[in-house]
Image (cartoon, rainbow, N blue to C red):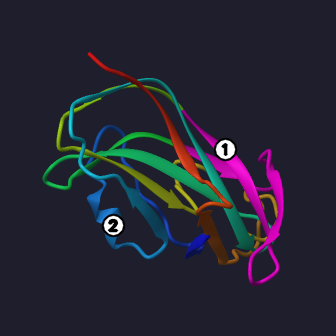
Amino acid sequence: VSQSRYQHHSFHMFPEKNGVRDQSAMTSRTDVLLFTSEALNQDMFLIGKAGLRLFGSWQGKDCDFTAKILAVDPENHAWIMSDAIARMSLASKIPTNQKDAAGNNIYGFDLNLGHMNFMLKKGWKIRIEVAGSNFPKYERNAGTGENSTFATSLQAVQQSVWTGKLFQSYLILETFKK
């Protein structure tokens, strides 16, 4: 079992402009987890639904888990293909009956990354970014359990993503081969 941790604070924005732009600067942020594939050994067509199953825990009353799926070119520029958010107070969660070291419940949950239609060339990589926010694109989560629109304070939340044999977090991609 492996645990990847980060601390999200609602004061830290994730600026995102409309349209396609390089996301490689996110690799230096300590509040973003990165999972990157090996370079593709052949062209890959991503056609259809994409989803992500994560197992997570958090210290706090509420939090968001956000995910981006990116195409990483051979020069390590990362391009968003899709993104999603799951607010833990509202998300459908799968109890695992397991707890982290701090006594927080570990849950499984799904992020729907929508439909895709991309061709990735040989040598490109696929990257998943997991974070606690994508504000201002998505509404900020105060971390206090309060309605974010009317929250009077913001609370940092320690979040963990779990992987390994017991907690098999994974990406679902529909592919097409020529």
Which quarter of the figure has residue 144?
bottom right
Residue occupied by mark 1: 110
Observer able to see residue 140: no
Q: Residue at x 58, y 63 (%)?
A: 164
Q: Residues within 10 Å of mark 1 (few under 14, many from 20)?
A: many
Side of 27 where 151 appears, left or right: right
Task: Name the residue at 52% across, 48% down.
Answer: 137
What amino acid is labelled 2 in the image? Thr
Magenta stretch: give its range: 84-113
Image side of residue 89 versus residue 7, left or right: right
Above-or-below relation of 129 to 79 = below
Q: Position of residue 177 (x, y in %)?
A: 31, 20
Q: Which of the pair 49/165 is nearer the observer?
A: 165
Residue farthest to the top, as pictured: 178
Figure check: 45 above or below 92: above
- For label 1, the SS is strand
> Mark 2–mark 1 contact, CB under 8 Å?
no
On residue 27, the disc is 2
Secondary element under disc 2, as helix, strand or loop, is helix
Q: Is residue 58 left or right of residue 172?
A: right
* Residue 26 coordinates in the image, percent (x, y): 35, 64
The alpha-carbon separation of the residues under discs 2 and 1 comes to 23 Å
